[in-house]
Image: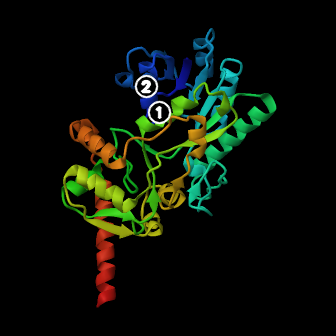
Amino acid sequence: MKALFIGGTGTISSAITKQLVTNGAELYLLNRGNQKNRLPEGVNLLKADINDEDQVSRLIGGLEFDVVADFIAFEPAQLERDYRLFKGKTKQFIFISSASAYQTPLSDYRITEGTPLFNPYWQYSRNKIACEEYLLKLYREEGFPITIVRPSHTYDERSIPLGVHGSKGSWQVAKRMLENKPVIIHGDGTSLWTMTHNRDFARGFIGLMGNIHAIGESVHITSDESLTWNQIYEAIADALGVKLHAIHVSSDFLDACSKEDYRGGLLGDKANSVVFDNTKLKRLVPDFVATTRFYQGIKQTVEYIVAHPELQTPDEEFDHWCDRVVDALNTALKIISE
């Protein structure tokens, strides 16, 4: 198989890149070359900014592919560019959308690919929906061979997946756990969520590559494991070897008092229970199974981050904000109790 990835070194795509090279695929990565340390041997790097359409057109001038996948397209204009570049040059074009595009709030907690796409809370999700609509129009009117993939919360060894964190990542929450400080969990922590390790995501994704039955289809790729946010945070604390001191805070309150995009990330995504039905994926990729349970994957993630201090990015502003939220709640409780 001859494939081109636009991106290819991110959380979702890096595991796919590694598995494809191991499987002997001829893989090209089109990116700016800033993550060369994450490129396995055997990858063909096309160093360019995808936004420089003329340069990219020259680089791929004599190339054709079985699959082209864009991991970093977020708006229809970017896909219009991709169409100009790859029309007639690929047998399959895969767009990475998002499961956050599904109806929010849900009318049924079980999500299939037939669940309506509607998210009034998050512009990111609405942009992904617009991207999907553009590609489906190309497929129906031009025969452009598209496949739409919708990931949910996918993680790897470089970042601890969380519901509430600051702009500098998740390490500060882990640090609070290690320092025996209260850790904020949105809502009452009982809503259901799905965490998918990127190795498992890669297995499903590769099964869709070159799959004629996936042309014109939209498919989500997630684990079958459902966890409450309380269980997720408990598993993280256990991996760190500490006791969790959780404080539950309304998602609406967090959105109202934070500078972060908690309206989109929480109210439009993580505050809602999600349970994914992967029947369609398993029909298209019969041997797909997500084998990494969260308690296993998070232990590997924590061990890796602890062993790599460069991934331990402090976020003092977020830490102070957490303290203020906790103090405010304790003050309110004291006033009401008097």
Q: Secondary structure at mark 2?
A: helix
Residue 290's spot in the image, x, y percent?
44, 41
Tag 2 near tag 1, CB within 8 Å: yes
Q: Residue furthest bottom?
A: 338
Q: Pick whichever, 264 or 22, lies toward us.
A: 22
Residue 193's spot in the image, x, y percent?
45, 56
Q: Earlier in the sequence, mark 2 or mark 1?
A: 2
From the image, tell me which residue sits under label 2: 19
Q: Residue at x 30, y 88 (%)?
A: 337
Q: Amino acid at mark 1?
A: Ala
Residue 195's spot in the image, x, y percent?
42, 48
Q: Residue at x 31, y 45 (%)?
A: 296
Q: Pick whichever, 65 or 168, lies toward us.
A: 65
The picture quadrant where one finds residue 187 is: bottom left
Tell me the distance, in whole angstroms, between the alpha carbons under discs 2 and 1.
7 Å
Quadrant containing the N terminus is top right
The answer to whether residue 203 is above or below residue 65 is: below
Q: Residue at x 56, y 50 (%)?
A: 277
The answer to whether residue 3 is above or below residue 105 is: above
Relative to 305, is 197 on the left or the right?
Answer: right
Q: Amino acid at mark 2?
A: Gln
Relative to 52, is 31 on the left or the right?
Answer: left
The picture quadrant where one finds residue 83 is: top right
Q: Residue at x 55, y 35 (%)?
A: 286
Residue 54's spot in the image, x, y percent?
62, 18
Q: Pick whichever, 213 or 114, lies toward us.
A: 213
The answer to whether residue 167 is above or below residue 89 is: below
Relative to 189, is 56 on the left or the right?
Answer: right
Q: Which mark is residue 202?
A: 1
The answer to whether residue 190 is above or below residue 220 is: below
Q: Which mark is residue 159?
A: none
